[in-house]
Amino acid sequence: MPLLKTRFIPVLTLLLGLVIPFLSSAHAWAVSNTLKAKSEIMRGQELFKNQAYDEAILKLSNARQLLGKSTSDIQYYLAASHYEMKQYLKAQKELETFFEITSESSFEQERYQKMVRLISLIEDGLKGKNPPSVFSVEKVSSGNTAAAAKIASAVEKRGKSLDEVARTGVPVEAKLFFKKGRTEVKRVTEKGFCQASKSAYDIGIEKREVVNKDVQIEVEHLSMNEDKSSFAFRSVKTDYANQKSSGSHEGTLPIKLVTMKSFPVPFLKTGVSWTENVKSLYLRTAIPVTYQVIGFENLNGFDCVRIKGQGNIRPTEYRLGKETLSDAVASLEHEYCYDYNNGGQIYEKIWHFGIQRGLTKVDVTRETKRISLKYK
């Protein structure tokens, strides 16, 4: 028996030496996942606030996976993001999970009621209707007083109420939006493909170039030139697709870029329409687009007018790059939200589409979102 004890003790010591470090590392890894999940949730909320809903979904889904479970906040932002992207079936699934794990008394009332409202709005979306945006002016949290103050400030400066503007319309006039220290940040993405030029070695072979651009551009107003024909600016361009930054750049731009957009109508009012030629770089031609004022809304704390346009040409032939296409159709859809109080577009989406003899030659979507606008 003493001999057995003597042999057993070293074995026990060896086993404990293997198990204890394993338990310690497992605990450290669990803590690490919790912190990672918290970071992903915070980033997802920021992306949601900036209306980058697809990216927000990725971050929030990753947080849920790291935790091994979901939370009310994660489900709230997942349901809201899918809804804003018009992915109604996915939004419905995330909403069901939200109500399964969330009681009304344990969640912020204003946000809980938005989830309740979402039930019928999702049903409308599934029936093919076009329910309105619910979260475009969403705050990240009730404790984010800086974001709330920014929105309140924008609301205070915007002048007439939306109801009043909808009744009277917005006059199209010469209005200058230059202001020293004004800094605007925009995110521009382009996705799709276009036909590439054929090389001498690939005769008869269709070649396509993938379009994948994702850049953020920050522009600050510095000063106006004496003749008031141009203004000096400073810009920083960040290329997310290629993971690089241009650094700070200074130059001049024509003053017309900071004046009220020229519209061929005296007033912007719901239902007003017009036609103008829009040049598409991808389609290599100008297309007559018919625009119509859809209505007025508040987007990210700024009042704006939403305008939609669509146009196409079906010429006997037109040039697409170096190639002459016959029996072709070129289409362009253009939607944007114009900030008539501060100038510039809060949101813009352009879809370029070209087809010849049943084959798609161009299919590119460009989206521009205003991330922030501030004055020093």
Image (tube, rainbow, N blue to C red):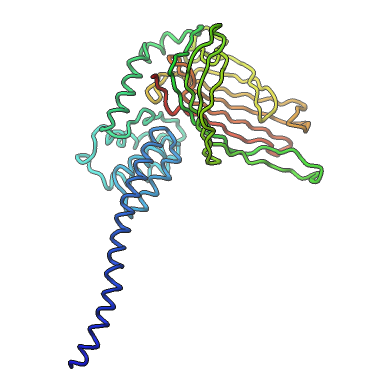
As drawn, 157 above or below 17 = above
The total number of labels drawn is 0
Residue at image position (77%, 33%) is 323
As drawn, 264 above or below 142 = above
Residue nearest the viewer, comparing 248 with 170? 248
Left or right: residue 134 compared with residue 11: right
- Quick one: which residue is furthest to the left in this view? 2
Horizontal and vertical percent for residue 129? 45, 32
Residue at image position (72%, 35%) is 356
Residue at image position (45%, 10%) is 170
Left or right: residue 181 compared with residue 324: left
Left or right: residue 314 compared with residue 157: right
Q: Quadrant of residue 155?
A: top left
Q: Quadrant of residue 327?
A: top right
Residue nearest the viewer, comparing 222 with 72? 222
In the rendered view of the protein, which quadrant contains the C terminus? Answer: top left
Residue nearest the viewer, comparing 141 with 101? 141
Left or right: residue 324 compared with residue 89: right
Horizontal and vertical percent for residue 314? 71, 26
Horizontal and vertical percent for residue 201? 81, 46
In the rendered view of the protein, which quadrant contains the N terminus? Answer: bottom left
Horizontal and vertical percent for residue 134? 37, 30
As drawn, 27 above or below 78 = below
